[in-house]
Image (tube, rainbow, N blue to C red):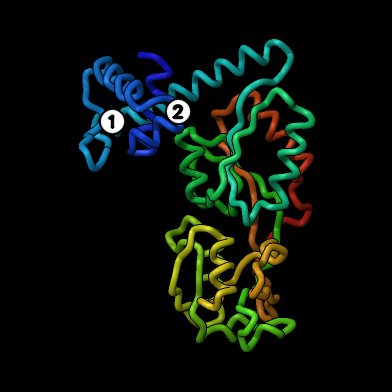
Amino acid sequence: MEARWLEAFIAVAEELHFGRAAQRLHMAQSPLSQTIRRLETSVDAILFDRNTRSVSLTPAGKALLPMAYRVLRDIALATAAAQAATGRIHGTVRIGFSGAFNHMTLPALARAIRRTMPDIDLELISRIHTGEGITKLRNGTLDIAFVGLPLGGARGVASRLISRVGMGAVVPEDHPLADEKSIRVAALADDDFLSMPLDGSSSMADELMRSCIASGFRPRVVQEITDPYMMLTFIAAGMGVSIVAEDLAPILPRGARWIPLSDQKIYMYHGIAWMADEHSAAVAAVLKLSEKVLPTPLESGAA
């Protein structure tokens, strides 16, 4: 078994499409299929059910996938350890983020990494919300994730607070309350709401629900949207309202207004997360640098 066979297997397992996996690996589809067949021969098991319409993992493929992630992660750690002995920090650090939330924090960190650690290759993966970030940390496809805090029962995942921002309402510019200096959450009780996913994977969605319930109503969520900026765009188009973190206010699309809340002090806590016991010298160096570039706020408790 070769590492490149596992890389090919992971690409197909994540894409569930041989053509897309081949593009991702910068190779033709025929050699990719041959690589998967070699791996199947090596493990003496069929890893994918494939026909002209779909590709899916077999039980053997599902069993191999977490082990494949671990093997490649261990190879990366071993390589980084050997390189660290030369006195320079090498390696790849994969950072997951949401473009809408991290428009201020990520650029500062990325610039500092490139300036002080030029031998580290950064891979920046966008549109990663908190739940997906934790999943990708655990399966080894991310090294660091920008997340909403607290993480709850994310066993094995370490985190650090990097910012604390207030929450406010976002409404269309023709909303009856659009010109108010501040509003109560209860004033939105009759509105349609747009929200990030309500499946527990989004800290902002959790805060929206808590603030509305504390004001005596359950919001009528007409659409859940995974992309924060797309949600703001839909609000600007008049499709509903929401409650979001203040750090989204500077990037509101034309046609939307952000309004502070007058009756509740609600905060969104942003942080970075990583696997506590499994990371390379390059990841450790980036985490240490982040403490200087994105320090934990002195007053981090909830108000």
Q: Quadrant of residue 25?
A: top left
- The reply to whether residue 303 is in sight is no
- Quadrant location of residue 212? bottom right
**Which is nearer the eye, 145 or 251?**
251
Residue at position x 51%, y 52% from top? 152
Which three-letter amino acid code belongs to the residue tagged 1? Gly
Please report whichever mark, 2 or 1, sits nearer to the chain's N-terminal start: 2
**The N terminus lies in quadrant:** top left
- Residue appearing at x 72%, y 52% in the figure: 104
- Can you say whether 278 is above or below 228 in the image? above
Residue 278 in sight: yes
Tell me the mark number nearer the camera, choosing from 2 and 1.
Answer: 2
How far apart marks 2 and 1 lie (CA) works out to 19 Å
Q: Position of residue 9 (x, y in %)?
A: 36, 27
Give the image location of residue 99, x and y in percent.
62, 52
Q: Which residue has dot 1 on it? A: 61
Q: Residue at the spot x=64%, y=61% of the render?
A: 268
54 shown above or below 9? below
The foreground one among 263 and 68 is 68
Numbered circle sitting on residue 252:
none
The quarter of the image holding the C terminus is bottom right
Marker disc for residue 25: 2
- Side (left or right) of 96 relative to 85: left
Residue 218, position as x, y percentages in the image? 47, 78
Residue 192 locus on image (x, y percent): 49, 79
Give SS at disc 1.
helix
Tell me the quarter of the picture where residue 282 sits. top right
Q: Amino acid at mark 2?
A: Leu
